[in-house]
C-alpha cells in the first residue's frame, strides 16, 4: 500500500508540474509581436490599397481602382521584370559561385594550405555581408563614377578606354551594374552556408574517392553537389525572396533610374508613398508584392520538401 501510494503521489506531482492549458501559452508573446509588427500593419496596408489617400486627411474608398490601374501601368510590370533579373543576380549566380567556391575551399585549399587559410578566405568572401548597405552603395557609386571612378580609371590605365561607361547613368548598362553589386553582396552568404553544409560531410568520402582515382571535378559533381542539396534549396528560397523584396541597394545606387531601368516593386511602392504621395496606389503595389512573395516562397518550400523526402528515400 505504501509503495502504491508513493507512485500515485509522484504521478499526481508530475501532473501538477505540467502547464495549465498545455504549451500554447508560450506562443502568446510571439503571437502578440507578430500581430503588432506584421498582421496589423499589413491589414492597414490592404485597407489603404482600396482608397485614394495623400497621407493627410481621411482616405476615400475607391474599390479596386488602384489594382485596375496597376494592370495598365508599364512601370509596375517593368519593376517585376527587373526583379527577375535580380533573382538571377541574388539567387542563381551567387548559389552557383558559392557552391564552387565552398568546394574549392573545403576540398582543395584546406587539405593543401590548412584550415586556417580556408577560414581566412571564407571570411574575406563574407566581408561584404558585414558592411552596411549605405557604405557599400557609396563605395560602388564612387567606383562606378564616370569621370574619376576607379573602374573607368583602370580601363584607361590598361589601354581599354573605349570600354568606359556611364555605369549607373546609362539605362542599358545600369541594371547590369546593379546586378554586379548584388552578386558581390550575396556571394559571402552562400559561401558560409555551403561551407557549413560541407562540414557535416565525412572527409573519408573525399579520401576514398581520391584513392579510387576520382578527380576534383568528379568529386564535386558526385559528392559535393549531392551532399549540399538541402543547403542549396534553403539558399535558393531565401535569396529568391530577398531578391523580390530588394530595396536598399536600389535606393542607394540608382533610385530606380535611369528612367525605370532599375525600378523594383519595393522601391516603386516607396516612391508612390513618399514622392508622389499616392499612398493608396503605393499600398496596392506593396499588397501585390506581398502576395507574389508569399506564393513563390510557399511554392519553393513545397518543392524543397518533396525533394528532401525523395532524397531521404
Image (cartoon, helix red, strand yellow):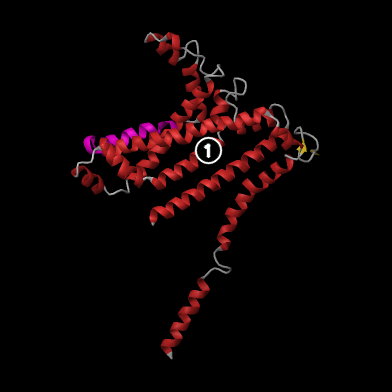
Q: What residue is drawn where x is 51% and y is 34%?
A: 87
| Viewer-nearest residue: 307 or 30 | 307
The quadrant in which the C terminus is found is bottom left
Q: What residue is drawn where x is 48% and y is 22%?
A: 140
| Viewer-nearest residue: 310 or 13 | 310
What range is drawn magenta here? 109-129
| Viewer-nearest residue: 301 or 126 | 301
Q: Position of residue 160 (x, y in %)?
A: 40, 10
Q: What residue is drawn where x is 44% and y is 84%?
A: 6
Furthest-left residue in view?
211
The image shows a total of numbered marks equal to 1
Q: Which residue is mark 1?
A: 242
Residue 49 lies, with reference to residue 20, above or below; the image says: above
Q: Position of residue 199 (x, y in %)?
A: 32, 46
Q: What residue is drawn where x is 69% and y is 46%?
A: 43
The quadrant in which the N terminus is found is bottom left
Residue 255 lies, with reference to residue 161, above or below; the image says: below
Asked whether residue 130 is in view, the answer is no
Task: Kindly report the secondary structure that dominates the magenta region of the rendered protein.
Answer: helix
Magenta-colored stretch includes residue 278 = no
Q: Badge 1, how many Cα within 10 Å: few under 14, some, many 20+? A: some
Question: Would residue 237 be found to the left or right of residue 282 on screen?
Answer: left
Question: Would residue 108 be found to the left or right of residue 238 on screen?
Answer: left
| Viewer-nearest residue: 302 or 150 | 302
Amino acid at each position: 500500500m505504501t509503495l502504491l501510494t508513493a507512485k500515485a503521489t509522484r504521478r499526481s506531482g508530475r501532473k501538477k508540474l505540467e502547464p495549465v492549458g498545455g504549451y500554447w501559452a508560450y506562443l502568446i508573446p510571439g503571437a502578440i509581436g507578430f500581430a503588432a509588427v506584421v498582421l496589423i500593419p499589413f491589414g492597414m496596408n490592404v485597407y489603404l490599397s482600396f482608397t485614394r489617400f495623400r497621407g493627410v486627411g481621411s482616405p476615400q474608398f475607391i474599390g479596386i481602382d488602384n489594382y485596375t490601374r496597376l494592370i495598365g501601368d508599364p512601370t509596375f510590370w517593368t519593376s517585376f521584370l527587373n526583379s527577375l533579373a535580380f533573382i538571377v543576380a541574388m539567387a542563381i549566380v551567387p548559389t552557383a559561385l558559392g557552391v564552387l567556391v565552398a568546394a574549392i575551399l573545403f576540398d582543395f585549399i584546406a587539405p593543401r594550405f590548412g584550415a586556417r587559410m580556408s577560414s581566412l578566405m571564407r571570411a574575406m568572401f563574407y566581408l561584404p555581408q558585414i558592411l552596411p548597405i549605405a557604405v557599400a552603395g557609396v563605395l560602388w557609386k564612387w567606383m562606378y563614377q564616370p569621370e574619376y571612378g576607379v573602374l573607368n580609371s583602370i580601363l584607361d590605365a590598361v589601354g581599354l578606354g573605349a570600354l568606359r561607361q556611364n555605369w549607373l547613368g546609362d539605362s542599358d548598362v545600369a541594371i547590369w551594374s546593379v546586378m554586379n553589386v548584388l552578386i558581390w553582396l550575396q556571394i559571402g552568404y552562400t559561401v558560409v552556408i555551403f561551407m557549413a553544409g560541407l562540414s557535416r560531410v565525412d572527409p573519408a568520402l573525399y579520401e576514398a574517392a581520391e584513392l579510387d582515382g576520382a578527380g576534383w571535378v568528379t568529386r564535386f559533381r558526385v559528392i559535393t553537389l549531392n551532399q549540399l542539396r538541402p543547403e542549396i534549396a534553403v539558399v535558393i528560397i531565401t535569396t529568391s525572396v530577398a531578391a523580390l523584396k530588394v530595396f536598399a541597394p536600389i535606393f542607394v545606387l540608382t533610385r530606380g533610374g535611369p528612367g525605370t531601368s532599375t525600378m523594383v516593386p519595393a522601391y516603386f511602392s516607396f516612391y508612390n508613398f513618399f514622392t508622389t504621395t499616392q499612398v493608396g496606389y503605393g499600398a496596392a503595389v506593396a499588397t501585390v508584392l506581398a502576395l507574389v512573395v508569399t506564393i513563390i516562397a510557399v511554392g519553393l518550400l513545397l518543392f524543397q520538401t518533396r525533394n528532401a523526402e525523395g532524397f531521404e528515400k
